[in-house]
Image (cartoon, rainbow, N blue to C red):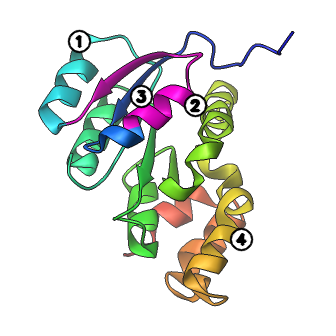
Amino acid sequence: MAEESRLQGKKVLMVDDELDILETLEELLGMCELHRASSFEEAKTLMTSCKLDMVILDIMGVNGYGLLEIANEKNLPAVMLTANALTLENTVKSYKKGAAFFVPKEKIVDIESILIDVLEAKKQGEKHWYNWLDRMGDYYEKRFGANWKESHKDFWEALEKHDYRLASRLRD
């Protein structure tokens, strides 16, 4: 018998304007109670009318940063899942705007374990980004080159040291 996921029954809103991404998330997160939205307005309505445990937000096409503000107001962990907005700048911006995690769509297969980490961190009062560099550092090096941390160097160093307050205060 397979072990039950710690996400079993969790209420998750998935927001993306790409139907195939929503379908993939449904396959990967079948243990959750899933809600889907493909527009900002639809997501905003669901975020204000449903009891949710967390949200997964695309950035482009659905005004993901606007939805992130709503999620923060409702104290909902928000995981940013993106392809077109996959830049170092958007990674840093997502952190500074309060996202729980930033995930390239190429790493969507890891979404279950990422969501578990985010919920566990919240439960234990830890910062959600405590293991982001461990999870994404190699991917970013392959994607952006060996010197990827040179852009926003102070931010990445603060994150490496788990100095989340400093990372939040550093200028863009």
Whether pointer 1 and pointer 3 mark residues with C-beta atoms closer than 8 Å, the reply is: no
Whether pointer 3 and pointer 4 mark residues with C-beta atoms closer than 8 Å, the reply is: no
Between marks 2 and 3, how big is the CA–CA gap? 20 Å
Image depth: mark 3 or mark 4 in front = 4
Give the secondary structure at mark 1. helix
Between marks 1 and 4, how big is the CA–CA gap? 39 Å
Disc marking residue 49: 1
Disc marking residue 111: none
Whether pointer 2 and pointer 3 mark residues with C-beta atoms closer than 8 Å, the reply is: no
Between marks 3 and 4, how big is the CA–CA gap? 28 Å
Residue 147 forms part of the magenta stretch: no
Image depth: mark 2 or mark 3 in front = 2
Q: Residue at x 58, y 57 (%)?
A: 164
Residue for badge 2: 28
Upstream in sequence: badge 4 or badge 2: 2
Give the secondary structure at mark 2. helix
Q: Pointer 4: residues within 10 angstroms few (<14), some, or many (20+)?
A: few
Image depth: mark 1 or mark 3 in front = 1
Q: Position of residue 96 (x, y in %)?
A: 41, 58
Upstream in sequence: badge 1 or badge 4: 1
Q: Is residue 104 visible?
A: no
Question: Is the residue 35 above or below the residue 139 in the image?
Answer: above
Residue farthest toward the right in the current orientation of the protein? 1
